[in-house]
Image (cartoon, grey):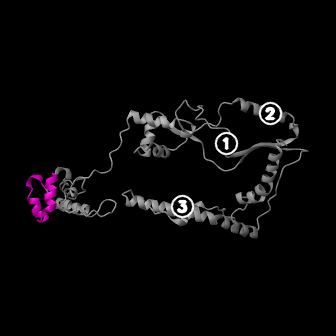
Amino acid sequence: MPKKNRKTKGRHPKPPKTDRKEIPLGVRQSIVNSPRSSTDEALQWPGLNLTARTIRKIRQRAKDRAKTTRNGSTRGIPLADITNVVNAPRGRPPIRLTLAVELQIIEKVTRNREERRKSALQHLSELKLDLSEDSFKKALYRHRYSLKKTLYKCELTDAHRTTRKIVARQLLNIDLSRVIFIDAAAIRLHDEGPDKAWYKDGEEYHPDVRASLHKDFTDGQFFGAICLGKRQGPWHIFPPETDDEIEAAKQDLKARNAPIDRFATLEFEAMEETYKEKVEAGGPKRKGKAPSLEVYLRNNRIERGDRTKGGGVDWYRLSEGYLVPKLIPWYKELKKGKQRALC
């Protein structure tokens, strides 16, 4: 029994396709304008070894080009026009990353503190370079630059040393034998992700790279302690949450989410309209499942967890029962009177 061809798994392989580039442009134009059938037309060119399938593909491709372009607009060009059989280039030729272009990118990225913290897409839009995000990053990687987290524990300045001395003097005035608990905490106006910057090894302490200890989202710093015989700050005991409180919280969150839903709906519709315009202009289509407005709204809403499992004090109870009515007013009084007492 003859051995089967493993590449075709026993089946007869298909005849190889004829490359369009091997067929002269004039021959392709003559094939499109010829009234003969595909089989008869293939016999007219014995030296090119054409098949009837190749003839049909050339004619069908010319008909499609004569009718529409890539973005779907009507061309209205006669079928006999030579532009219908010209080999159109597939995509734009990539820009060669010369040393001059790479140095231009590095000069832009390392210009100042703000430029080092911009993303690759932001730099590409400002430089107006026809590059992909990966090509931009590879150009920086070749020069050992990468987007990494910055160091928070940097070298102390004179201002830091002065502040530490003031705190140490205040701590020495406290009878530490009567201190039960002591801790420090920052008052944040909003959350912020990790600080990242473009830099290479050895630039960790560069003034434009290292993280600032004075955060824009921090409004104050508490040095708190629980001491025997000292006046305490605001406190609150949370009893178990009742059904009426759970229902009231649902209505409150529903009212808060109403403007968020309106804005998120407009944002979602704008993104979908932009995507459709890009596709009509010949851009790539998205892969996978189409996004849903319901999922987009759910991801942007303010919600609580399941209150039937475990209970406890979540972010909503802590905010509405302690932070807003007690801690924030107390902090404002301290800030107004410029009190910096530790106990």
Instruction: Name the dominant secondary structure of the magenta segment.
Output: helix
Residue in the image at 42% along x and 35% along y: 102
x, y percent for residue 331: 79, 49
> Residue tagged by mark 2?
166
Residue in the image at 49% along x and 60% along y: 271
Q: Quadrant of residue 159?
A: top right
**Numbered disc 3: secondary structure:** helix
Q: Nearer the viewer, mark 2 or mark 3?
A: 3
Identified by mark 2, the residue type is Ile
Identified by mark 3, the residue type is Glu
> Residue tagged by mark 3?
267
Residue in the image at 86% along x and 48% along y: 232
Asked if the residues shown at circle 1 and circle 3 are in contact, with their CB atoms under 8 angstroms apart, the answer is no
Asked if the residues shown at circle 2 and circle 3 are in contact, with their CB atoms under 8 angstroms apart, the answer is no
Mark found first going from the N terminus, 1 or 2: 2
Q: CA distance from mark 2 to mark 3?
A: 50 Å
Q: Residue furthest right?
A: 229
**Numbered disc 2: secondary structure:** helix
Numbered range of the magenta stretch: 23-49
Q: Quadrant of residue 278?
A: bottom left
> Residue tagged by mark 1?
215
